[in-house]
Amino acid sequence: MTAQNAAAQNGAAHDGAAQDRTRPGAFPARISIVTLGVTDLDRSARFYEALGWKRSAASSPEIVWFRTADSALGLFPTEELAADAGLPPAGEPSFRGVTLAVNLESPTLVDAALRTAVEAGAVVVKPPVPTDWGGYSGYFEDPDGHLWELAHNPFFPFTEDGSLDLP
């Protein structure tokens, strides 16, 4: 059962806008940045640019930034990211227990997005198929093995800016 499936079935969602972010110790329900450790910064940047994502002017030779609908994606060399967190670098990538997801408005758009990802160099892990929760979903790996889900979830509408508007 995917996280999307669980949320769709039980209606679990949090209203981040209703939280008091000014209270000391408040921990807002938002994800501002996802940073991916990459083995070849230029190759990974080209991959995401080939998806049609725009590189931010905040990028530098050390880190590449992409703006997404409601957060930012950073690409940073894996060993440097581990050092920044005070951890030893990981070995060969394997399933990390994390997926990143892009929800789309229709199954047709899921298929088209997957074709774009494959043309950019992605490896299909699971072709998109109808799901048991009423959606449509598939997975690919980026050049560094980060797992992305492309999904159409008819229970998760979008706002005008392309963000999910969870019920």
Image (spheres, helix red, strand yellow):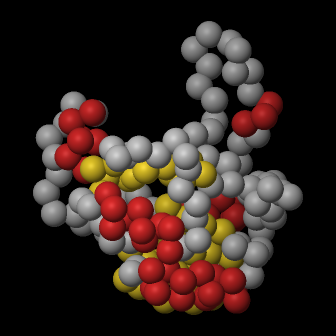
Left or right placement of residue 13 versus residue 58 in this view: right
Looking at the picture, how far across and down is residue 50, in whole percent? 50, 74
**Residue located at (68% from left, 12% from top):** 23
**Residue drawn at 25 percent across, 50 percent down:** 78
Q: Residue at x 42, y 68 (%)?
A: 46
- Horizontal arrangement in the rendering, residue 56 relative to residue 159 (left or right): left
Residue drawn at (74%, 82%) of the image:
106
Q: Is residue 136 visible?
A: no
Q: Is residue 148 left or right of residue 12?
A: left
Answer with the quarter of the image where residue 123 lies.
bottom left
Work out whether residue 61 or residue 16 is closer to the camera in this orientation and state it.
61
Of the pair 140 and 18, the residue shown nearer to us: 140
Where the C terminus falls, by quadrant?
bottom right
Q: Where is residue 83 shown, x and y percent of the image?
A: 21, 36
> Is residue 67 toward the left or the right of residue 140 in the image?
right
Toward the top, the furthest residue is 24
Q: In the rendered image, which quarter is residue 18 located in?
A: top right
Q: Position of residue 21 (x, y in %)?
A: 70, 21
Q: Is residue 108 visible?
A: yes
Q: Classify 80 as above or below 44.
A: above
Q: Nearer the viewer, residue 1 or 144?
A: 144
Looking at the image, residue 146 lies above or below residue 65: below
